[in-house]
Image (cartoon, rainbow, N blue to C red):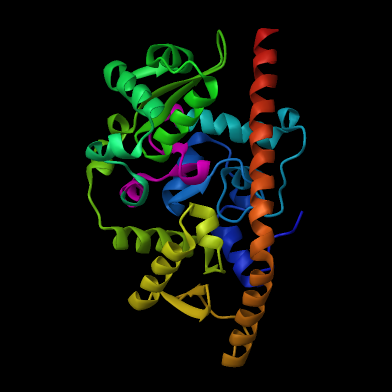
Amino acid sequence: MRSRPELPEDIEEYRDEHWCREGTRLIETAFDAECFIERIGFAACLTDSRRPGPSLYLAACGRRDAVLPRHVQKDPEASLTWTLKDEIVKRGRIYYAKLARGKAMFLAPRMIPYFHAIWGVRKSDEHRRLTRSARAILRVLRREWEIGTSDLRKESGVKNRKKFSRGLDELQAAMLVVPSEVLYQPTFTYLWTLGIGRFPDALRRRVGRDTALREIARCFLTGAGLTIPGELARVTGLSRPDAGLGNRALVADGYATRLGPGTYRLATLQPLPDSSAARRQRIAGQQVQDNRRQNDERVGHDDEVDAEIDVHERDWIAEHQREREK
């Protein structure tokens, strides 16, 4: 498995501070987690140091090099992250769902309109853009408003488990459906509801696509300090061309400085101590070369890490159920 590209130490320290990857800033309560997400705009849930971007797990660990252990069920930091996620979902102040490319993400309410402008599906487009299974599930939720997974599958008539799961993922990615609570008794299940019921104002607000791309890029760069080729796309699920449009809009606004192809630095960030024009170009050029060499390999690496995280999640659920049944 390939390690992630090296970043300048001043950028790593900047991210440590903003993404709570320090022991003095670690997240321990649901309230702290909500404040963290509100401040940075969006974050992944259980990703570790092998994936770029802010993560609740890394913030709960309080260090930048944390890696999910093979047996997450007995790991206190992974358990804390899972518990915080459940509490955040129940409290309903932060948006949580599997969004683009199946990425489980938290969104601050202020970022919902921008993500919805890119990935949301309007009611007039549902028949064209949603599968039959997804539409059947959505009809039940619009009638029942909130319902558990097993009852939802039964009421929707989608008996095939894989089709049902894909339909739910599709509705989450379209920002139509969100989990509203996690129950462990009598068996593990999610309760599901309509996103518009929890975040009506944010989901009804209309913004243009160009504005949405710019603000998503701004949100990430504010916390990252610097973005390298492909990083914004991997973190958010945007396509590489869309990520480029967002970053270039920041340059036009004077919010970012372009150091090289795909490499952008926050304009207000203090430069490296010995930063001359030649050194900036050398750093940017080396980053571009390194990332071009790793981009193709990274696709397989991302899939491998995503699959491992999915296994961790399934193992955690199974272990938690066994503990509850004792």
Does residue 196 sit above or below 146 in this rendering?
below
**Residue in the image at 56% along x and 41% along y:** 45
Does residue 7 sit above or below 78 in this rendering?
below
Instruction: Pinpoint residue 258: horizontal percent, then vertical percent.
Output: 48, 79
Does residue 322 sit above or below 135 in this rendering?
above
What count of labels does the image hold? 0
> Which stretch did the figure color magenta?
89-116
Q: Is residue 53 visible?
A: yes
Does residue 285 sit above or below 323 in this rendering?
below
**Residue in the image at 39% along x and 33% along y:** 171
**Residue in the image at 69% along x and 46% along y:** 304
* Camera-nearest residue between 259 and 255: 259
Instruction: Pinpoint residue 105: horizontal percent, then vertical percent.
Output: 49, 42
Q: Quadrant of the C terminus?
A: top right
Q: Is residue 103 visible?
A: no
Does the segment drawn in magenta span residue 61? no
Instruction: Pinpoint residue 56: horizontal percent, then vertical percent.
Output: 57, 43
| 148 horizontally vs 261: left or right | left
Does the segment drawn in magenta span residue 97? yes
Instruction: Pinpoint residue 312: horizontal percent, then vertical percent.
Output: 68, 33
**Residue in the image at 59% along x and 86% along y:** 281
* Camera-nearest residue between 250 and 116: 116
